[in-house]
Amino acid sequence: MLYKDLVIIGGGPAGLAAALEAAEQGVKDVMIVERDSGLGGILQQCIHNGFGLHVFKEELTGPEYAQRFIDRLDNAGIEVLLDTMVIEITPDKRIFAVNSEKGVLEIQAKAVILAMGCRERTRGALNIPGFRPAGIFTAGTAQRYVNIEGYMPGKEVVILGSGDIGLIMARRFTLEGARVKCVLEIMPYSNGLTRNVVQCLEDYGIPLRLSHTVIDIHGKKRVEGVTVAKVDENLKPILSTAEFISCDTLLLSVGLIPENELTKMTGADFDANTQGPMVNQRMETSCEGIFACGNVLHVHDLVDFVTMEAKFAARGAAQYLKEKDGPCRKMSVIAGEGLRYVLPHAVGVEKMLDEKQNFFMRSIKPMKKARLSIQSENGTIKTRMLSYVKPSEMINIELNKSEISKAAGHLKFILQEEGASDER
Amino acid sequence: MSDKKNVTCIICPVGCRIEVEIENGNILNLSGYRCRRSLQYVKDEVTSPKRILTTTVRLKAKGAHVLPVRTRAPIPKSLLKEAMKELKSVSVAIPVKMGDVVLKDVAGTGVDVVASRSWTE
Ligand SMILES: Cc1cc2nc3c(=O)[nH]c(=O)nc-3n(C[C@H](O)[C@H](O)[C@H](O)COP(=O)(O)OP(=O)(O)OC[C@H]3O[C@@H](n4cnc5c(N)ncnc54)[C@H](O)[C@@H]3O)c2cc1C
């Protein structure tokens, strides 16, 4: 059995930033366990630019962003176990992992940071009927094939879902000489950044068809085409609009799910909306000494926020390792009207890491203008006007310690569309 | 003869749709924009649109396949295809460090293509 002060599961941007920050905070015995053969997580396959504008104030590619952290690991004296998959974790922080060299490893940690990232929803999650021919990929899998393994999964492509990964793969396939026939989106708006709609689709004349979905996949051995249809306001396909589009490849870019199989073994409380664990102000789950950050906690659109959150989790773990924890008055955080979730789920004011606390949240729908207000049992704590809110772009707001201390009972976040509520 | 073109501004989340009237590469008229930043973006986008190109090149290493690369600066949009063609024949030996030049002056743009990550062993 190995004994470690802090074990970090996952060596993506969340795990890397957490490890470096923990070392900086004086935590001695830090180990990263990563199942892949290299560090960097999903960033290694995201070879496009657009990363790091907040953290580094310049536009980096995914691998460049990761490399900046990887290059600092050696000097920080952080131990890294590659090609090692964690398969079990107990509530008292015992970790079981496997690799081909040592077989099963058992590690007892004093604190754990979960940084396992997320995975993509697959065809099974969508219930598209038809055979199961070759040529159906999630966009991320195709991205790995093209950008890491170096081969092209197809020549004529239809993409379902207009999230950023789907849009970016439309451009990538086109540059590599394939023909992307269209990107279909079931919602009446794109889930991706405007910048990606412009630079990945419009630049290359790829049509984006909103309020459309795939209702059938053709071909037995290999995809031969798909039937697409317009959907009505209840997202039900309008069969009279069905149309056949020939293709040999269908990419699915229909959402990400936090990878929480291990988290569930700890017995930590979960948030049904984020599909990740509930955390407090220092990213600690309800299982004491086990922290979470990055996409395993909630799906992020920007890696900069992942890095920020990971640093928080690391400082939280360092604080936990230093002072054995006493009682702390906790205030619950509630996602009210207009919001899908708010994070963290609870704030223990005495153990806040800074004078300010950042809260992350997502709206339930796009709004041109909206009022964000934070309320407690004794009234409104703060309000802020926001413009051009989108579910795909995370909102964040800071509250001062004094503002949180003033609140009673709970902190409730509410997002109201301006003008719209009166009309109803 | 003047030409009409629609440009979506990407500077901020508002995403203004701007209608531009052009004649011989000169902008005659602009409508639908709300701020100065947008104005500059549209001018650049209509007269000389540029993009950073990110792609992969062959990597000569055991167990490895391709190396992610990028143009150090944005290059004219019209030369992206040409740049891709030139990069097809580039092959890099290890060790390689992030920032190493893998191709100089791609497609005659004066811009170098550099490695996006390091690769040793
Ligand atoms: C396909 C895809 C494309 C994306 N594209 C972009 C983009 O273009 N721009 C952007 O800003 N964001 C993008 N994102 C979001 C991106 O995931 C985050 O910005 C960031 O990479 C998340 O960091 P992370 O460390 O939480 O997760 P990841 O980068 O996913 O890292 C998690 C790591 O944990 C490891 N791991 C998981 N389970 C285990 C286990 N049991 N044992 C050991 N190791 C384990 C994984 O191998 C992985 O290395 C994308 C996400 C996906 C899935």
Image (tube, grey):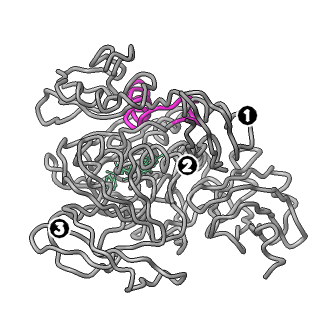
Mark 2 vs 3: CB contact within 8 A: no
Which is in the foreground here, disc 2 or disc 3? Answer: 3
- The image quadrant that residue A343 belongs to is bottom right
Give the magenta-colored segment's residue range. Answer: A52-77
Label 1 crowding class (10 Å Cα cut-off): few <14, some 14-19, many 20+? few
Residue type pointed to by label 1: Arg
Residue B24 image point, x, y percent = 54, 27
Residue at which label 3 appears = A223
Q: Is residue A180 above or below residue B12?
A: below
Q: Residue at 24% across / 75% down in the picture? A: A217
What chain is tagged by disc 2?
A: A
Q: Classify 10 Å Cα crowding around label 3: few (below 14), some (14-19), many (20 and above).
A: many
The kind of secondary structure element at disc 2 is helix
* Circle 3 chain: A
Mark 1 falls on what kind of element?
A: helix
The foreground one among A349 and A94 is: A349
On the image, numbered disc 2 is attached to which residue? A313
The mark lying in front, picked from 2 and 1, is 1
Could you tell me which residue is drawn at 27 percent across and 42 percent down? A147
